[in-house]
């Protein structure tokens, strides 16, 4: 069964509104989760590393005030796209890491469309 | 910083034939992991195969095998007896062996088409 649950799978929102995406680890407690963004026909680009109980670590060029990450528990990380604009339309996918070298587990992704 | 390069944006293969996808990477680390992921149109990321850098033996998973050349920093994927269901985007990915640094760095991907 699924190890990572990501919701919603798709969302359409109006420009200027905020959207929250949830990523849940179902099988184990995850101190670390990763948020990726994938534009059409492109690769996955790491946006940020979500750390339970502390601030997220953002990759260079990612606006931390625009992409708010909260990792308040060992099983849930949320990504909030604030004041969304059409250029934020993309596919967002989370992944969860065990600290044992095993492969990351990915959520099914969220397709965000900002109109 | 680590980089992963996939030089083949697109590849095609006849059904039942064999195809090899190329991947090179750059790192100064000695302990790391390499992966191939498949992303079908559903966009779900599916792990195909994994290789630990400290292992000399090439990983195999049924019809999928890798040619891991550590000195050359090369990690190619061979798909034997290609099937229609193999059609997808394939991403090569690198992960540090450092504890607490499990993020993946992906290559740009190769779109594989299977010709019936």
Image (cartoon, rainbow, N blue to C red):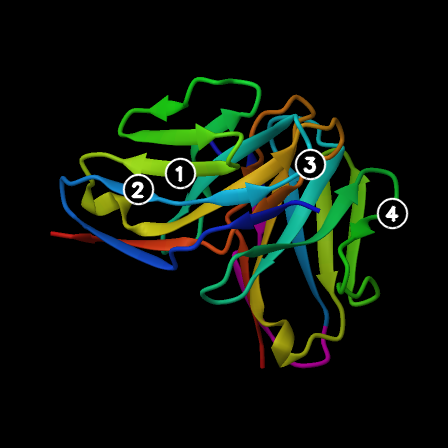
Asked whether A16 falls inside the magenta stretch, the response is: yes
Answer whether labels 1 and 2 touch (C-beta < 8 Å).
Answer: yes
C-beta proximity under 8 Å, tags 2 and 3:
no
Q: Are marks 1 and 3 on the same chain?
A: yes
Spatial separation of the CA atoms under disc 1 and disc 4: 37 Å
In contact (CB < 8 Å): disc 1 and disc 3: no
Q: Nearer the viewer, residue B19 or A34?
A: B19
Q: Mark 1 falls within which chain? A: B
Measured from the top left, where is residue A42 in percent x and y? 49, 62
Q: Is residue A112 above or below residue B55?
A: below
Q: Secondary structure at mark 4?
A: loop
Label 1 element class: strand
- Chain letter for mark 2, please: B
| Span colored in magenta | A6-17
The residue that appears at 45% across and 41% down in the rendered structure is B37
Residue at the spot of label 1? B76
Residue highlighted by disc 3: B28
Q: Earlier in the sequence, mark 1 or mark 2?
A: 2
* Front one among A66 and B98: B98
Q: From this viewpoint, which residue is outermost toward the left?
A: B116
Q: Identify the residue at image location x=71%, y=47%.
A: B1
Residue identifier under label 2: B20
SS of the residue at dot 2?
Answer: strand
Marks 1 and 3 sit apart, C-alpha to C-alpha, by: 19 Å
- On screen, residue B20 versus residue A60, left or right, reads left
Q: Which chain is home to disc 3?
A: B
Pair 4/2: label in front: 2
Instruction: Check if mark 1 and mark 4 are on a common chain.
Output: no
- Whether tag 1 and tag 4 are in contact, CB under 8 A, the answer is no
Q: Residues within 10 Å of mark 2 (few under 14, many from 20)?
A: some
Which residue is label 4 attached to?
A: A55
């Amino acid at each position: 069964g699924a190890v990572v649950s990501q919701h919603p799978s798709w969302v359409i929102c109006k420009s200027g509104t905020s959207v929250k995406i949830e990523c849940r680890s179902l099988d184990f407690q995850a101190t670390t989760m990763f948020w990726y963004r994938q534009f059409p026909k492109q690769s996955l680009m790491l946006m940020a590393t979500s750390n339970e109980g502390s601030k997220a670590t953002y990759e260079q060029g990612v606006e931390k005030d625009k992409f708010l990450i909260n990792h308040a528990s060992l099983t849930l990380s949320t990504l909030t796209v604030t004041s969304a604009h059409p250029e934020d339309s993309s596919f967002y996918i989370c992944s969860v890491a065990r600290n044992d070298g095993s492969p990351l587990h990915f959520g099914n992704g969220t397709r965000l469309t900002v109109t | 910083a680590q980089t992963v390069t996939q030089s083949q944006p697109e590849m095609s293969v006849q059904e039942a034939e064999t195809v090899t996808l190329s991947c090179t990477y750059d790192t100064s680390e000695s302990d790391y992991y390499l992966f191939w992921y498949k992303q079908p149109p559903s966009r779900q990321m599916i792990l195909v195969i994994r290789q630990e850098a400290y292992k000399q033996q090439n990983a195999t998973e049924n019809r999928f095998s890798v040619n891991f050349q550590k000195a050359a920093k090369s990690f190619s994927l061979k798909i034997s007896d290609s099937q229609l269901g193999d059609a997808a985007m394939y991403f090569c990915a690198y992960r540090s062996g450092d504890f607490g640094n499990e993020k993946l760095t992906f290559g740009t991907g190769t779109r594989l088409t299977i010709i019936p």
